Image (tube, grey):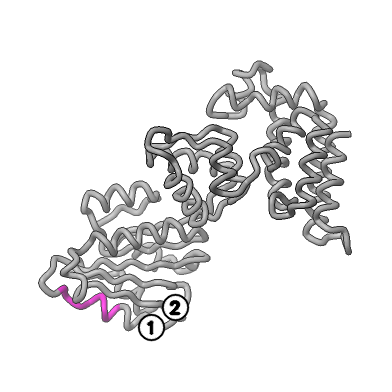
Amino acid sequence: MAESKAVTYESIMRDLVAGNYQPVYYLHGEESYYIDKIADYIAEHALQPEERDFNQTVLFGSDVTASQIADTCRRYPMMAERQVVIVKEAQNLRNTEALEKYVKQPLQTTVLVICHKNGKIDGRKRDFVKAIQQAGVLFESAKLRDRDLPAFIEAYLKRNNASIDPKSTQLIADAIGADLSRLVSELDKVLISLPEQDRRVTPQVVEDQIGVSKDFNGFELRDAIVNRNIFKANQIMNYFDKNPKAGSIFSFLPMMFNYFQNLMLAYYSPQKTQEGVAEWLELKSPWAAKDYMSGMRNYSGMKVMQIISKFREIDAKSKGLDNPNTPPGELMKEMIFFILH
């Protein structure tokens, strides 16, 4: 039996690759990417191709009851070591009582995979949660935070024998966001385009394959603001005006708020060197602190506090609070003007 402890996607996949299957997998959360990856791996590897016709069943939560799922799980495999039962859209199950009863005494020759997307298991069902943890694996697939996207992109490309520079990483993260299924699809498109003799992802590759301008994008706007380059910032804003899909306030605000929030913390660093600031902000390398060193030269601590306050005001307005008719583009211009002047 599995111990009742937190599990990760990586730990689950290690066990699956090693051929260690649990009787129950309850996969839930807002991020569908990891749920699909785990379920797909089990579907493709838990049984031999010739065993699947009789021993692999895919059910949908909107079409079956918990009793039907439990009955299917209690069948014995035919001429195979195990059977696999995959329940998709499990969030649509109306009553889980029969399923809860089965999970407390699961059949060891059945691998039950429950895919609960766009939400989490009801936390009030403590007995059900405990039974899942004791019988097998309970895994929450949480949305990746924006700040974690660069690390995900770099790791994914590295696993596929490709490298990427920080600017290209940020371009992709800003353009695609935290939808991992879409992000991986775009990264796969980039990987296919790379020649065998040169597996580097550059800004030009990103522009050619994903359609993000290497000169006019959120990364370049951030760089212009960090260095207080008013001319360049206005150039990029004019480009955004003509190409709304290239950048919007909804991607700009979180990115810049995170920067100025960290910049405020940088002022409290005991050592104001690039290495000291990097360590204080827990950045992965001193190079990553370069923008904060520039920011401290170009913005006073008081100005940073005012900018953070302005971010909160603009964020509220962008969501319609105390703002009957100002469009997002104008709010973005207002924010940038306030920062740079």
State the residue at coordinates (58%, 37%). Answer: 203
216 lies above or below 185: above
Horizontal placement of 289 versus 294: left or right?
left
Of residues 83 and 298, the one drawn nearer to the viewer in this rendering: 298
Q: x, y (%) of residue 144?
A: 53, 50
Q: Are marks 2 and 1 in contact (CB under 8 Å)?
A: yes
The quadrant of the rendering that contains the N terminus is bottom left
Q: Which residue is mark 2?
A: 93
Of residues 65 and 147, the one drawn nearer to the viewer in this rendering: 147
User: Within the magenta stretch, is there residue 76?
Assistant: yes
Of residues 219 and 5, the one drawn nearer to the viewer in this rendering: 219
Q: x, y (%) of residue 108?
A: 20, 66
Circle nearer the N terminus (2, 1): 1
Which segment did they paint magenta?
Answer: 70-77
Q: Dividing the picture into quarters, in which one does residue 307 lie?
A: top right
- Image mark count: 2
Q: CA distance from mark 2 to mark 1?
A: 8 Å
- Kindly identify the amino acid type of the residue bearing the numbered disc 1: Val
- Looking at this view, name the residue that lies furthest to the left: 79
Of residues 176 and 206, the one drawn nearer to the viewer in this rendering: 206
State the residue at coordinates (42%, 47%). Answer: 192
What's the mark number on residue 31?
none
Q: Residues within 10 Å of mark 1 (few under 14, many from 20)?
A: some
The quadrant of the rendering that contains the C terminus is top right
Q: x, y (%) of residue 80?
A: 13, 68
For label 1, the SS is: loop
User: Within the magenta stretch, is there residue 41?
Assistant: no
Is residue 143 something that shows in the picture? Answer: yes
State the residue at coordinates (79%, 48%). Answer: 312
Q: Which residue is mark 1?
A: 64
